[in-house]
């Protein structure tokens, strides 16, 4: 019968949201388990590499958000049509993820955290956005002739970037048109409307 899917992450979009987008787009039912922060210290030791998100598929555990997303994208026809397109999709995803991973999400010193976030968002993010705008050109999607999970990842991550620095939307118009194109996909629009509203 149908596989049983359980996603384990925090009550955040964060690194889990790309997986939720892929489930929404594919229409596959899954358990969206959101760990309470108070429970994390007892759950962490039970997880193979101690980090979330993880996806359990009929008892098999996959870790690493991008590996999970790539698996679901391939299963649902949004990974890229050829090995070459899949490599371009992976390169764009990794480029976006490289920047998101530079942000010191777990920094305990609020002054240091704020200063590093402001520096990266002011001085590094514009270059990334210009590069994405140039790569997109006048195409409808980042890779190939139809939507891929690179487009989903851009919407997921740019939503958080805009929440941190809204004026990033003031330049590079086409990548923001792409964002709205992703959000207009019926399954994605429905998920965005129904998902728990969190800051990050
Ligand atoms: C306490 C941890 C925390 O606040 N967050 C976890 C990481 C994160 C958040 C929002 N986006 N995001 C993220 C998304 C993709 C790639 C990446 F490296 C990071 C919020």
Image (cartoon, rainbow, N blue to C red):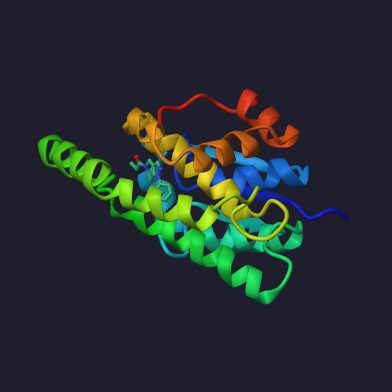
**Measured from the top left, where is residue 118 in percent x and y?**
20, 38
Question: Considering depth in this image, is 102 or 13 the residue closer to the camera?
Answer: 102
Q: Quadrant of the C terminus?
A: top left
Does residue 145 show up? yes
| Residue farthest along the bottom direction in this orientation | 83
Q: Quadrant of the N terminus?
A: bottom right
Classify 166 as above or below 29: above
Q: Is residue 103 above or below residue 64?
A: above
Q: Is 130 or 186 nearer to us in this picture?
A: 130
* Residue occupying the point 43% across, 41% down: 172
Q: Residue at x 74, y 51 (%)?
A: 4
- Say which quarter of the image contains residue 184: top right
* Horizontal and vertical percent position of residue 173: 48, 38
Apparent side of residue 165 relative to residue 196 in the rendered image (left or right): left
Residue 30 visible, this orientation = no
User: Splitting the image into 4 quarters, where does residue 169 fall?
Assistant: top left
Residue in the image at 47% along x and 64% along y: 48
Q: Position of residue 72 (x, y in %)?
A: 68, 58
């Amino acid at each position: 019968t149908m596989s049983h899917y359980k996603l384990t992450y925090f009550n955040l979009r964060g690194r889990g949201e790309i997986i939720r987008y892929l489930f929404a787009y594919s229409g596959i039912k899954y358990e969206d388990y959101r760990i309470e922060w108070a429970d994390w210290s007892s759950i962490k030791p039970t997880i193979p590499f101690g980090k979330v998100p993880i996806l359990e598929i009929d008892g098999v555990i996959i870790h690493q958000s991008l590996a999970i997303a790539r698996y679901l994208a391939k299963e649902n026809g949004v990974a890229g049509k050829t090995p070459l397109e899949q490599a371009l999709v992976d390169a764009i995803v990794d480029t976006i993820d490289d920047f998101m991973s530079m942000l010191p999400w777990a920094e305990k010193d609020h002054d240091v955290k704020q200063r590093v976030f402001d520096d990266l968002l002011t001085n590094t993010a514009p270059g990334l956005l210009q590069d994405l705008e140039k790569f997109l050109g006048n195409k409808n999607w980042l890779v190939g002739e139809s939507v891929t999970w690179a487009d989903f990842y851009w919407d997921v991550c740019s939503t958080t970037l805009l929440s941190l620095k809204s004026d990033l939307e003031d330049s590079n118009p086409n990548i923001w048109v792409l964002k709205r194109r992703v959000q207009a996909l019926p399954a994605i629009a429905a998920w965005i409307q129904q998902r728990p509203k969190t800051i990050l």
